[in-house]
Amino acid sequence: MLERLSEAERRCALGVLESYSVILEPRLKELIFQAWSQFLLRKPGVVWVAPLLKSGSRAPKSSQIIWATLRGHKEVLEKSGAHVHLLRSHKRHLAKRKPDDWLVLVDDYIGSGRTAAGVLTEVVQADPTRTSENVAVVAAVAQSMAADHLNGRCKLDVALVRHRCLSDTQLVGFLEQMRGLGRRLRFPECEVLGYENTEAALTLRRTPNNTLPMFWTNRRVGGAVWPAPFPRGNDRET
């Protein structure tokens, strides 16, 4: 990839790579249980746990993998006296829940917070009596901007918070170069620095599209596939 960058772009890419995180198993599993331990500090009683999943989602999602991981360790989930029910969809608990029961939505990563906010809107629409006081999102990793986006919508418990890799660091002076590179890679203006311009620098089981595009896209640029070091896959545009 570096050979296809300008000198300024190359310096920025190397700077971002110094703080780039690749989080795989078993570290990812450790982080999700750390986040769950933070949630238990809220002293919940009855807890309904479901993957953070938008209605109509068909392809396997990372939130479903995290949910399955938690399901395999229910004794850990209940170690502080919580009584935990695991559901494949947040909509399945409505008939049984009581007003003081918690609803917890789990995922590996919260990027901009927009997807999570959409799911929380679905929760309220399906159950108008539900308030943010007993709804939580539990994730291994989240961007700091997600907390701002979800403020007032739910409780947020995460093990690792990531900041914007350019705007919140000494690399802020490279913002325009990176926006220009995102345009050269043919991303819309709202995604030139990652989805919702999140400025993430992170790879989990799959690189989230919140990460700067140069690190994961495999689109054709100048007649050749972009040589991303952390390819996300399935991103080939004509």
Image: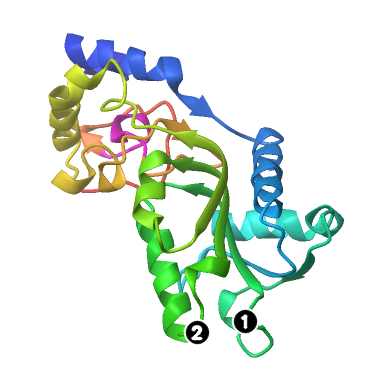
Quarter holding residue 122: bottom left
Which span of residues is magenta-colored? 211-219
Task: Give the left or right position of residue 205, taking residue 80 as reference.
Answer: left
Please, what is the three-letter code of the amino acid marked with disc 1? Pro
Is-magenta flag for residue 135?
no
The structure residue drawn at horizontal position 18% and vertical position 18%, both measured from the top left corner, is: 173
Quarter holding residue 153: bottom left
Q: Is residue 109 above or below residue 84?
A: above
Residue 39 percent across, percent down from the top left: 65, 52
Residue 71 percent across, percent down from the top left: 76, 61
Task: Give the left or right position of residue 26, taking residue 158 as reference.
Answer: right
Task: Give the left or right position of residue 219, taking residue 34 as reference.
Answer: left
Q: Is residue 11 above or below residue 92?
A: above
Q: Are marks 1 and 2 in contact (CB under 8 Å)?
A: yes
Residue 125 percent across, percent down from the top left: 42, 83
- Which residue occupies the foreground of this view, 154 or 182? 154
State whether residue 234 appears in this view.
no
Badge 1: residue crowd in 10 Å (few <14, some 14–19, many ≥20): few
Which element type, helix, strand or loop, lies under badge 2? loop
Name the residue tied to disc 2: 129
Which element type, helix, strand or loop, lies under badge 1? loop
Q: Is residue 82 above or below residue 196?
A: below
Residue 146 percent across, percent down from the top left: 39, 48
SS assignment for the magenta stretch, majority: loop
The structure residue drawn at horizontal position 86% and vertical position 57%, both measured from the top left corner, is: 75
- Which residue occupies the foreground of this view, 129 or 74? 129
Identify the mark nearer the N-term, 1 or 2: 1
Name the residue tied to disc 1: 99
Please, what is the three-letter code of the amino acid marked with disc 2? Thr
- Mark 1 vs mark 2, CA separation in Å: 8 Å
Identity of the residue furthest to the bottom in this view: 95
